[in-house]
Image (cartoon, coloured by chain):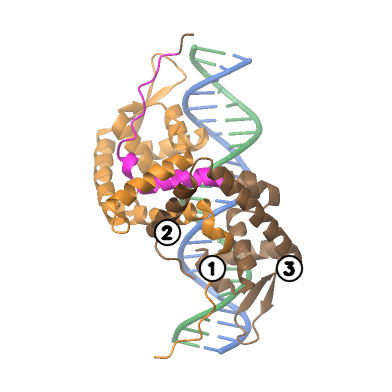
Chain colours: A brown, B orange, C green, D blue
DNA sequence: TATTGTTATACTCTATAACTATA
DNA sequence: TATAGTTATAGAGTATAACAATA
C-alpha cells in the first residue's frame, strides 16, 4: 500500500506549553461529550444544565447568586431564566423580605428533569474516565480549581 | 464589625465532579489572562494568536491544515485569514503543484508581531505559574492532552 | 444613593448550506 | 466524483448601557 507524500509533521511551537491553549481544546472536547450525553437528550445547554444542578442542590437561589456562581451577567441570566420558566422547569417567587429580590425554585417537572440530567452526567463522567483514570480525573479537577482560583458563591 | 446575615453556603452538587464544568471555568480564567497579556496588547483574539504561533513555527501551512489543527471550520478560517491578511500580517500564496490549495505565510510584519506575542506568552505563563507550580503546570497540560485526545495535525 | 432585576442591543464565536475552481 | 477554498447566513454566547422598582 502506497501512501500519499507525508506532509512534515506539525510543530505546535509555543502553544505546546501554554496552559490556556490546552484548556480551550479540552473545553471543546468536553462540550461535545456534554452535547451527546445531556444536551441532545434533554434539550439543555451547558449553562442551563449547570443552573439546574445548582437549583437541584440548593432548593432556592436568588438570581444574583446564580449570576455570580456561574459567571453569567445579570441580563443574560434573565433571558436564561425566562427560557427555562417558559419550559415550565422553574418559577420565580418574590422575596417577602426584600421586594427587589426573588427566589428561583424548580417546579416538579424541573426537579424531575434535573434529576435525570444529573444521572446522565454520571454516565458522561464514566466515558471521560475511559480516557482518564479515576485518580487522574480527581487530580485534573484539583489542578483546574487551582488554576481558576476560588469560586464566588 | 457586624456582618450581614450569611446566606447558606452554595452547594455545587453534581457539578463538583464534572470535569467539563471545571474545564469550562478554567477556560474563562485563562481567556481573561490571555486578554490582558496578549489580546489587548497586540489586538489578537485567541484563535488569531494560535494561528500566528503555528505559522511562526511551521513556515508555511495550507488553510486545510490550519483548519484541522485549530478545529476551525473552513468558512470561519477564511474570514480569519482575511482579517489577518488585511492587517498585513500574512499572505496567501497559490500552490504551484495543486491549483486548489494555498500556502499561508507570515509577512515580515506578521513574523515580528508573532515573535513579540510569543515572548509575551512566556510572561503570561509565568503569571499562571503563580497559581500552579511548575510540576503542576506540566501535569495539568498532560492531563488535558489525555482528556482531549490526540490532536489532528 | 445603592441594589435587584429587566429591556434593548451589539459583538464575538461557531456551524451549515450552497457555491467556484481545480483535480 | 472528490477536494480546497469561498460566500452568505444564522444561531449561540457574552458584554454594555439605560431603565424600573425597591431598599
Q: How far, Cα to Cα, is label 3 from label 2?
A: 32 Å
- Which residues fall within the magenta stretch? A4-32
Report which residue position mark 1 lands on: A67
Discs 1/2, front: 2
Magenta: predominant secondary structure element? Answer: helix
Quarter of the view holding residue D9? top right
In the image, taking residue A71 as reference, residue B31 lies left or right, namely left
User: Residue A107 got which mark?
Assistant: 3
Residue A83: horizontal and vertical position, in percent? Answer: 68, 61
> Which residue is nearer to you in this view: A140 or B124?
A140
Discs 1/3, front: 3
> Residue A13 lies in magenta, yes or no?
yes
Q: How far, Cα to Cα, is label 1 from label 2?
A: 19 Å
In terms of sequence position, does the residue under pointer 3 or pointer 2 come before the other? Answer: 3
> Which residue is nearer to you in this view: B99 or B128?
B128
Chain name for mark 2: A
In terms of sequence position, does the residue under pointer 1 or pointer 3 come before the other? Answer: 1
User: Is residue B34 visible in the rendered structure shown here?
Assistant: yes
Q: Are marks 3 and 2 in contact (CB under 8 Å)?
A: no
The residue at 55%/73% (across/down) is A64
> Residue B121 lies in magenta, yes or no?
no
> Which residue is nearer to you in this view: C5 or A45?
A45
Q: Are marks 1 and 3 on the same chain?
A: yes
Chain name for mark 1: A
Dot 3: element:
loop
Residue A71, placed above or below residue A8 = below
Report which residue position mark 2 lands on: A145
Residue B134, placed above or below residue A78 = above
**Within-10-Å neighbours for mark 1: few <14, some 14–19, many 20+:** some
Amino acid at each position: 500500500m502506497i501512501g500519499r507524500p507525508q506532509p512534515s509533521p506539525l510543530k505546535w511551537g509555543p502553544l505546546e506549553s501554554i496552559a490556556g491553549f490546552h484548556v480551550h481544546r479540552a473545553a471543546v472536547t468536553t462540550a461535545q461529550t456534554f452535547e451527546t450525553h445531556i444536551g441532545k437528550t434533554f434539550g439543555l445547554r451547558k449553562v442551563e444544565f449547570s443552573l439546574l444542578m445548582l437549583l437541584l442542590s440548593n432548593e432556592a437561589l436568588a438570581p444574583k447568586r446564580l449570576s455570580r456562581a456561574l459567571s453569567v451577567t445579570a441580563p443574560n441570566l434573565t433571558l436564561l431564566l425566562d427560557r427555562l420558566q417558559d419550559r415550565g422547569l422553574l418559577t420565580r417567587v418574590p422575596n417577602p423580605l426584600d421586594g427587589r429580590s426573588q427566589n428561583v425554585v424548580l417546579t416538579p417537572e424541573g426537579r424531575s428533569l434535573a434529576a435525570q440530567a444529573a444521572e446522565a452526567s454520571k454516565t458522561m463522567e464514566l466515558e471521560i474516565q475511559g480516557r482518564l483514570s479515576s485518580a487522574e480525573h480527581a487530580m485534573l479537577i484539583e489542578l483546574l480549581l487551582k488554576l481558576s482560583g476560588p469560586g464566588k458563591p
